Every structure is written in C-alpha cells, then in structure tokens.
Amino acid sequence: MVPAEALAALSSLAVDEPELDALTLGRRIRELRTARRMTLDTLAAAIDRAPSQVSMMENGKREPRLSMLRTIALALGTTVDELMRTDAPSERAALEISVERAQRGPVFQALGLPRIRVSKGQSDETLHTILSLHNEIDRLNRERAATPEEARRANSALRQIMRQQDNYFPELEAQALEILTAVGHSGGPVSQQLVADMATHLGFSLHYVNDLPHSTRSVTDKRNGRIYLPTNRSASRDSRSPIVQAFASELCAHEEPKNYAEFLRQRVETNYLTAAILLPERDAVRMLTEAKTLRRISMEDLRDAFAVSYEMAAHRFTNLATARLEIPVHFMKVHESGTIIKAYENDNVRFPSDALGAVEGTTVCRSWTARTVFDVADRFSAWYQYTDMPAGSFWCTSRVEKAKEGEYSVSVGVPFAHVKWFRGRETSNRAVSLCPDESCCRRAPDNLADRWAGQSWPAARTPTSLLAALPTGTFPGVDQTEVYQFLEAHSPH
C-alpha cells in the first residue's frame, strides 16, 4: 500500500490514530479507584485535592498535570504509564467514552440537544442507541459534505504524494512480485490463465453473469469467495484487468473507505497494483532499459509486448520512468472536450489548475498534444509533437482511444533534454503555448471578438453533471441496495 509516511499530506482527510484524551484518562482513574474500593473523598484526601476536583478529572473535564498524575498513580498503587494507556479500561468505559465524545462533538451542538449525564444507571442498550443515532446522523452529514470541492482537495493532496514518490511505490511492486511468484510466472506477458490462478490462490472463484449491478464493474462476495464479472465484455477491452482489479483490494487489505480521500487512495493503489501485475517490473524495466539504450522508447511497444491497453502502458511507464530510468515525465488523459480527466507530472510541466490546486476538471491548452491529436487524420499511428511553453520545451506522444463517454487522448511527455531516448523525436510537429495567459487560447482573437461580440447567442450543451451532487455512499456512486440484492440472489447458500 501507499506508505504511511507518504500519506502525511492526507492526514487532515484521514482517520486519526488513537491518542490519550482526558475522557480516557478520567475513566481509567475511576475504574482503578472503584476496583480498590476507594470513595471519591478517600482519593481526594490522598492527593490533597477537593472531591469536586477529582470528580472533574474522572469526568474528563479537567486534565491533570504530570506531577498530579504521579501523585494519583501513587495513591492508586499503579504507575503513570498505566494511567496514560490510550485504550479504554473496559467495554463499558469505552461505550461511555464514545457517548461523551459524541455529546461534545459538532452533531449534538448543531442539533441543540441537551447533554445527557452518563451514569451507571443507564443500560448498555440505551447508550448504544444514543451512539448509533449519533453515528448515523454524522454519516449522513459527511455524505452531504462530500462536495466536489472536498473531492478536488483530496485528489490534489493525493497527486502531491504521487509526485513525491515519483509515482513509484515499492510496497505495491513487492506485492505484485509475490503473487506472480506464487502462481509460477517466469517472465513475459501475464496470461489469462495465470490471472485466474491468482484469483484461485487468493481463495476466489470467477463467475460471469449478465445481471451485474449497473453501477459496478465487478462485485466480490467475500463471504463465499466469489468474484462476479460481466458476460458482455467488449472485444477491445482487456479481460484480465477487471479480475486483477477485483482481487487487488484483497491484496492491499482494503477496508470500506471512511471518507472520499480514502476512497481515492484505494483506487490509486488498486490501479497501480493491477498495472504492476500485468506489466511485471522486472520484465518491463528490462524492455524499457534496452529501448533507452537503443533510443527508441515507445508506449506502443510496451503496450504490444504485454498485451495491455495503451492507457495502462502509459500509466505503467510513469511508475517506472523516473525511479528506474531516471526520466522525468508527465501523463494526461483528456476528454475530446479538452477537459483533463487524469494528470501526473514530475517534470515541471505546468498543468492548468483551479484555486484549490486541482488539475482534473480544468481545460488543457488547445496547442498541447493532448488536444491537437484529435485533429490528426491517421488514428492508427502515434502522434508526436514538440510544444514550446513558458516553462520550457516539451515533447509528447499521444493516442486517441474511444469509451462510452466519447473519445479520450492519452499522452506521455518529457522535457526536451530527455526526448533523445524516445522514438518519434525526429518529428517536425511543433506548437507554441502561452497558457495560462488568456491570450493563448482562452480569449477570442481581437478581430473575431470585434466582429461577433454581442452578435452571437450559442445554446450551450450543458453537461448533465454540471449541477449534480458528488456521488454519495461508502463507494461513491454505487447503489448498495442493488449490490446486496444481487449477492443475495447469487449466493450459493
């Protein structure tokens, strides 16, 4: 998985590790006091404090200093380390602490609910009910809060992590090697049979169905060890990739994502591991190193050697280019409308971005290879182009691929100093981009603007997603009820 130290940028978006707080400390003091049959007054006298002060400490309303902790520990016949343990002293104490935390949180405050005094007289069932209601309200609030802005912030933070790692993650490479070795892969392309053997090795059987939930690409039944895949597979799509993506989450030990940032991280890990399995590092690096020596690195050759899509070959190249070949690189997937769908760079090319630093969803310059490739008549040959930008000159290779949402360009580029390693460097195609200067391509030329400003009224083809809310749910956009009904219908038991 993505290493913990690399996830520092996402710390504000992820779940915090447990840490000692006044509530846990207070409950531990109370548990130890009652276990020793000491009254509140007795402990207060032993530490030379008023009973009301001890009560406030036990209720988590006052946190004692270290010197006072030593005195309390001595009076209770224990150690400071024991008092400062982060785990709750008992199941009942853990339940009480959770309810107290909930009451001090924003949900209770926003609803204006009165505080409930948590006491021994309340049953576990009552406290569980209060906590369950709080957690459900909190979940619904977080779903509503999963705005496009939050998603874009999370995506920007994740891209920064990828850039810091040069988009290379040794832990995922090691996991790919482990599963490849387990099924006897000896080198070269990974066959459909080997992929099926991996699923079997992990305890899964493959089942092809024609009623897969419409919002899913596959469904995994972890209880019965089944992976469900669609029967209506496209002839142009790699049939191995959905299988690997389905069991990649098992290899990564993914749990249900708690927030959008975690969902994005899991998706990146799944896609990375899938590419690392279908284009094994040792074989891919050997091929790319030979191609670099011969000065003819090509995404098409990488695609054909491992029988994968051009997009996967380009994505895999970004994993290995810098870490293993010492080549800085950038990658883009752009819709025919000019909208950036995916982007990565560590070569200082300047992508367009919004105020949040998000690149995805912005529009790429008309002069960039990712846009000019759509005007090329020959869709069967690679398109190469040099683009002179404010940040320097970059060379790029690009291809157009089709999907149900329309056409996309997939592009890989490098700074001019590194083009010597690539096939297609001799191209005469060249363009100039002044973006983000609006005079480049975002503002109409003066002669056209003078003639037509105020004289045109286009009927915009508004994207259906323009005002749509960000998909909600544990797995955004997935109809959980539909998935459960599907699993129930196909369960062998």
Image (cartoon, grey):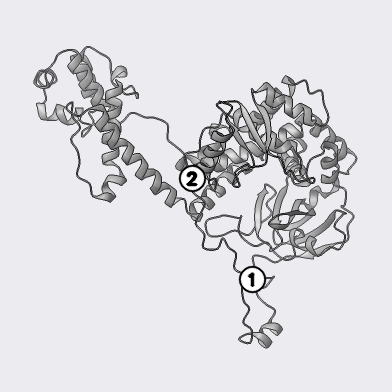
Above or below — where is 380 with respect to 175?
Answer: below
In the shown orientation, is residue 120 left or right of residue 429? left
Residue sitting at 65 percent across and 54 percent down? 341
Where is 35 relative to 215, above or below?
above
The amino acid on which the numbered mark 1 sits, given as a three-letter code, is Glu
Depth check, mark 2 against mark 1: the one in front is 2
Residue position for label 1: 438
Q: Residue at x 20, y 22 (%)?
A: 30
Residue 168 appears in view = no
What x and y, as percent, mark residue 362? 61, 60
Mark closest to the chain's N terminus, 2 or 1: 1
| Quarter placement of the N terminus | top right
Q: In which quarter of the image is residue 42?
A: top left
Please state which of residues 95 and 21 is positioned toward the viewer in this rendering.
Answer: 95
Whole-percent x and y of residue 210? 67, 41
In this rendering, does residue 258 appear at all?
Answer: yes
Task: Write down the residue under mark 2.
Answer: 473
Image check: 253 left or right of 28?
Answer: right
**Mark 2 is on which residue type?**
Gly
Dividing the picture into quarters, in which one does residue 191 lie? top right
The CA distance from mark 2 to mark 1 is 39 Å
Q: Which of 395 and 120 is in front in this view?
A: 120
Q: Is mark 2 on a helix, strand or loop?
A: loop
